[in-house]
Image (cartoon, rainbow, N blue to C red):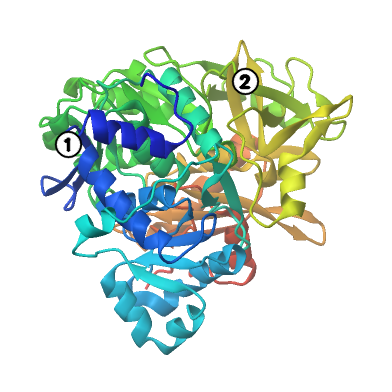
Amino acid sequence: MIQLPTSLVDILRWRAKHQPDRLAYRYLQNGEREEIILNYVELDKRARAIGALLQANTRPKERALLLLPPGPDFIAAFWGCLYARVIAIPAYPLHPARLEKMLPNILRIISDATPAVALLTTSLFDAVQTSDICRDKFADIKLLPTDHPDKTSLAEKWQEQLIDPNELAFLQYTSGSTFSPKGVMVNHRNLIHNLGQIEKHFGQSSESHAVIWLPPYHDMGLVGGILQPLYSGYPSTLIPYTLFLQQPFRWLDAISHFRGTTSGGPNFAYELCLRKIKPEQREQLDLSSWEVAFNGAEPIHQNTIQRFAEYFSPSGFHQNSFLPCYGLAEATLMVSGGPKKRSLQVRKLSRTALERDHSISSPASMEDEWKIVGCGQVPLEQQVIVVNTETLSPCPRGQVGEIWVSGPNIAPGYWNNPAATNESFGAKLSLNSDRTYLRTGDAGFLDDGELFITGRLKNLIIISGKNHYANDIEQTASNSHPAIMPSGLAAFSVQEDDGEKLIIIAEIHRDQDLCKKEEITKAIKTAVSTCHDLQVHDIKITCAGSIPRTTSGKIRHFICRKQYLADALNPLNPT
């Protein structure tokens, strides 16, 4: 673009005028070849229609709850909110057949954000109206169906308005590990800056082509999969999240068929492909166009990357396509990542040293070794520091601490929550009170400009005075027996009278013989004892899908602990 934009609306309006027929989004309804196409001019028209609908029913800066399934309707509604200067709230949509079961999660967001309107389909509108409970809960919210047949006349009623870069674009509700949702306030300036960072560090251009299965209610799916392609001017092919989970071959097949250059997801997605895609399916794939295979949103396992690269090498995939990255909603999306097409940055560390005093040193033996993958370079416009949380001073070289971030991509805070905003976004070093930082809650270190994440501070397990990272224990236990699902482990601690106790939940493949329960349990205990010198207090064996996760696949450790203490895990038992 010739003139620097101040909002996303500037970008789409420019593209609709100068590149009207260029493909913006392709939505694969059945996850394969049944597609809906949106070019820039059609998207602009639909956004103006919904923008006009919102302008007639709201005031600028009010909130709109998006209760729409993934696809063109959701995308058009999100852009319509931006066109109307209404703050969008992406939320996992209610299903008409399961309204009352899904309602509590939506009500928590409604209570916090107090939206003026909700955008939804006609079928969901009718379902809400016929449910006494739902109709009562939505009594103070205007329900606006967006599948209006006459979009052209509505679009002509839209009135363009100037958008201040500091105005909020949307609220990204964190799907983290508590029942108290926090809405991250993302403004246009945050978005424009972070999208520029991603474009540079991921090496994106108008010649790129994204293939995305991530849900649009999560920051990686929304910012990385929907907004980033339009910002840089390349198309995005979208696959429904559930259809990817059912058959991950659809993901790689779409990359192969549409010649995708950019795609990815959390580590579990690559594990899922390794487990479910058969050699005869692999032979149908040509992955030579895949230049950026980003991996983020959960711990990155070097073993997964290596096995994926080896398995799909016959299909043209190259290991240097992997681009590990790190980010969070509070930083709009990306904190570190790239550059593309380089070898993995892997460090072999001493697990014992990390547990003892957070120091970074070489392992004393193979049993003591922990391979950790770097999450990319930090953009020059950002400042990332590693902080000792007790002294609030930068950690010396070779020490692990909490990751703090400052820069123009950091959101202003949490909606209507000054206490949480001050705690997370108002961090200051003890010797410098001028600059504030975002406390990520993640532990790690910097080495030659590369960011390494060692674990989640809130998931730190402290037993007998030693620090253990939950994800480290989970990785050890997951490799202990073939019956355990990839990324199907949750490790956490509970407080007993004589100290913290380690608990593990293990998901096993549905076709496994439950008589192997004792064998699996013994394997987990042996592996954890050998690698971590830890005794597992209790192990619960469950079926696939039992462990609570966020929409991006992160384990919700807090809820796991809560369910365990309430004896609500429903462990499998032999019949």
Identify the mark at residue 348; answer none if there is no mark.
none
Q: Which residue is at a point 66% across and 38% down the rendered structure image? A: 440
- Disc 2 residue crowd, few under 14, some 14–19, many 20+, Cα 10 Å: some
Location of residue 556 in the rendering, given as x and y in whole percent from the top left corner: 55, 54
What residue is disc 1 on? Answer: 253
Q: Secondary structure at mark 1?
A: helix
Vertical comparison of 54 with 248: above or below: below
Of residue 85 and residue 272, the one placed in the foreground of this image is: 85
Location of residue 18 in the rendering, given as x and y in whole percent from the top left corner: 24, 28
Is 288 displayed left or right of 297 in the figure?
left
Identify the mark at residue 349; answer none if there is no mark.
2
| Amino acid bearing label 1 | Asp
Do we see residue 550 in this rendering? Answer: yes
Of residue 155 and residue 490, the one placed in the foreground of this image is: 155
- Image quadrant in which the C terminus is located: bottom left
Q: Which residue is at a point 46% across and 62% down the rendered structure image? A: 65
Q: Disc 2 or 1, which lies upstream in sequence? A: 1
Q: Which residue is at a point 71% across and 40% down the rendered structure image? A: 425
Quarter of the view holding residue 231: top left
Q: Which residue is at a point 69% across and 41% down the rendered structure image? A: 457
| Amino acid bearing label 2 | Leu
Location of residue 336 in the rendering, given as x and y in whole percent from the top left corner: 54, 25
Q: Secondary structure at mark 2?
A: strand
Closer to viewer: mark 2 or mark 1: 1
